[in-house]
Amino acid sequence: MSEFFSQIDWEAMLVAIQETFIMTIISLVIAVILGFILGIILYITKEDGLYPQKIVHRILDFIVNLFRAIPFIILIFLLLEVTLMTMGTMLGVKGALPALIVSSAPFYARMCMIALSEIDKGTIEASKAMGASNWQIIMKVLIPEAKPALVSSITVMGISLVGYTAMAGCIGAGGLGNLAYMYGYVRQNMPVMYTATFFVLVIVFMIQIIGDLIVKKIDKR
């Protein structure tokens, strides 16, 4: 066992864990904000929405479906020029963020729209009958009712992002994926690869547990 652990550079492992956390948290926060806005717009502009806008809805729906359909590894290469212009580098944590955000925001937008669509239409009609404005319906009916589903979607997306960071690490984005591939697989240092994988699983379980606890607390149904 001591021989196993002696083959691991723990300082590099700690840096990789930090990089994975940074990539996941930053991209998650930005993707949730953008995805939430997109999801709300998609919901309210559909035919039976609060502000029906057929053209706007179709354009946004197409964009969301398009970016959700592109595999993440391909998206990284498609966004290389954009990444270089906006972040100044294609490597490291900064180089991974654009692809992580662009891949996740449309996903969360779709999840938001699904969560909002599951709200009982009778609740919305009752709010209208009581004189609530569309803005009040959005803020005081739709979002509160959909909150558990929205948080669950964040949990799912957070777990997906951890997987994406590992994938991005294989092409130089840093983090546990990069460590597992470059210093584990390529150099046939199995203790590094297994340990990096273990910490990826720990992060995934942490996100799942925290997400489940939050949902349990806010779900009043």
Image (cartoon, grey):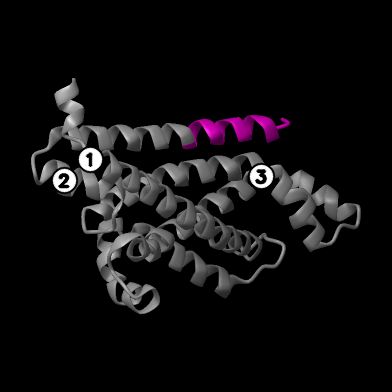
3D distance between C-alphas at marks 3 and 2? 44 Å
Furthest-top residue in this view: 1
Going by the image, does 83 lie left or right of 192? right
Dot 2 surroundings within 10 Å: few (below 14), some, or many (20 or more)? Answer: some
- Give whichever of 152, 84 is nearer the camera: 84
The C terminus sits in image quarter:
top right
Name the residue: 8% across, 44% down. Answer: 187
**Where is mark 3, residue-wise?**
146
Q: Secondary structure at mark 2?
A: helix
**Where is mark 1, residue-wise?**
9
**Where is mark 2, residue-wise?**
183
Name the residue: 28% across, 69% down. Answer: 90
* Residue 66 shows in the view: no
Q: Secondary structure at mark 1?
A: loop
Dot 1 surroundings within 10 Å: few (below 14), some, or many (20 or more)? Answer: few
Determine whether label 3 and label 2 are within 8 Å by CB. no
* Position of 79 relative to 26 (above/below): below
Q: Is residue 139 magenta?
A: no
Mark 3 or 1 closer to N-term? 1
Q: Nearer the viewer, mark 3 or mark 1?
A: 1
- Give whichever of 45, 174 is nearer the camera: 174
Mark 2 or 1 closer to N-term? 1
Q: Which residues are magenta?
A: 207-221
Dot 3 surroundings within 10 Å: few (below 14), some, or many (20 or more)? Answer: some
Mark 3 or 2 closer to N-term? 3
Q: Nearer the viewer, mark 2 or mark 1?
A: 1
3D distance between C-alphas at marks 2 and 1? 10 Å
